[in-house]
Amino acid sequence: MTDTDTAPVLDRAALDARITFHEELQIMEVDFNDVHFPDSATVNAFYDRLEARIAATGEEKWFFLVNLNGTRIDPAAWTAYSRRGRALNLAHSMGSVRFDASEETKRQILRAANTEAFDPNLFSDRTAAIARIAEMPSTRRARVTHDPTYTTADFVRRIRFDPETVIMDVDFSHFTFHHSRDVNDFYDHIEERIRATDRRWFFLVNLNGCEILPAAWVQYAHRGKRLNEAASLGSARYAAGSETEEDIRLRAESQGFRPNIRNTRTEALALIEEMRAELTKDT
C-alpha cells in the first residue's frame, strides 16, 4: 500500500528511449550508455521502468543485453543497483550479458559476481555479447496464466475494521505474494470489503515476515497506490527489519510515496494518530 507524495526522479520518455525489445531474438536491450547513478533513487527510477515495460509486453522471460559504456555507479547507488538488478534477473531473465563496461564499473560487477555467485558475462562489444546470448537456451513457455495460490478464506481473516478508530487492520504477516495473481486476488478482496463500508480508512499494515517476490512487485505497487488514492486516510506499516521493509524503502524513493514503516505496531499506531491530528487540523 502506497501514499503518493514525491515526484519521479527521471523522465519516463528518456527512460523508455533506453529500453528496446527485440522480439525475434527474445532480447531486452538496456542502454546505460553514459548514465550516471549518483544515488539509489536514480537506480530505483530506472528499474521501476524496466519492470513496468517488461510487464507491458505480457512476456515474463527475456535475455538481457546491457550496454555499460560510460556508466557510472557511485558508492551510494551500488547497493540499490545490485539489489534491484538481482531481483529483476530472478524474475525475468533467461540470461544477462553486459558489454563495453568502463574499468571501474567492470571491477564493481566482478566484485559483486564473486560475492553473489553469478556469471558477469562481460564482453568488449555488442556483437560479441549478442553472440553469447545466441548460445543460451531459451526457457520461455507459453504465456503464463497463474493459478490461484490462495482462497478467499485465506484473505478474510487478515482484514479487520475498527469503526471507533477508523482503522483497517491489514495482516500481511508471513504471507507470500508469489506473482501478480496473488496480488490481484488479495487486493480485489480488500477493495470489495472497503466498498461495503462506503468510507475511507486509515490503513495499518503488518508486514512482519511478508515476502513480495520479484514477479509480484509491479502489480503490488500498482494496486497499493490505486487503493490508497481511492480509500485511504493515511497508511502506516510495521515490520521488524525484513527484506520486504528494505525493498519498500528503496522503491519509495522513486515511486512517489512515503514508506511510513515503523518497527512495531505501537509505533505505527502512533504514526496514525499523528496523521489523524493533521487531518483534524486541516478541517
Image: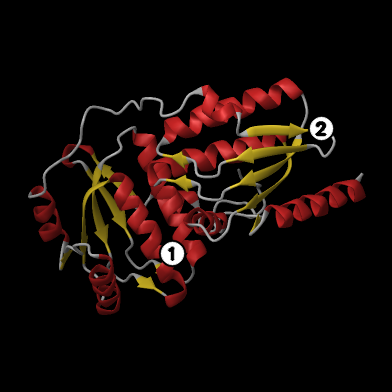
Q: Position of residue 269 (x, y in %)?
A: 75, 51
Residue at figure coordinates x 42%, y 76% from the top left = 75
* Residue farthest to the top, as pictured: 196
Q: Would you name the residue on which mark 1 appears?
A: 80
Q: Nearer the viewer, mark 2 or mark 1?
A: 2
Residue at figure coordinates x 56%, y 29% from the top left = 155
**Can the viewer see residue 82?**
yes
Q: Amino acid at mark 2?
A: Pro
Q: Are dots 2 and 1 in contact, CB under 8 Å? A: no
Q: Position of residue 57 (x, y in %)?
A: 34, 35
Q: Would you name the residue on which mark 2 appears?
A: 163
Q: Position of residue 222 (x, y in %)?
A: 53, 39
Q: Amino acid at mark 1?
A: Ala
The quadrant the C terminus occupies is top right
Residue 263, numbered circle: none
> Viewed as shown, does residue 114 lie left or right of 2?
left
> Viewed as shown, does residue 100 lie left or right of 208?
left
Instruction: State which quadrant residue 60 falls in.
Output: top left
The quadrant the N terminus occupies is top right
**Residue at disc 2, secondary structure:** loop
- In primary-sequence order, the first of circles 2 and 1 is 1
**Residue at disc 1, secondary structure:** helix
Label 2 environment density (alpha carbons within 10 Å; few <14, some 14–19, many ≥20): few
Label 2, label 1: how many angstroms apart (C-alpha)?
A: 40 Å
Q: How many numbered circles are shown?
A: 2
Label 1 environment density (alpha carbons within 10 Å; few <14, some 14–19, many ≥20): many
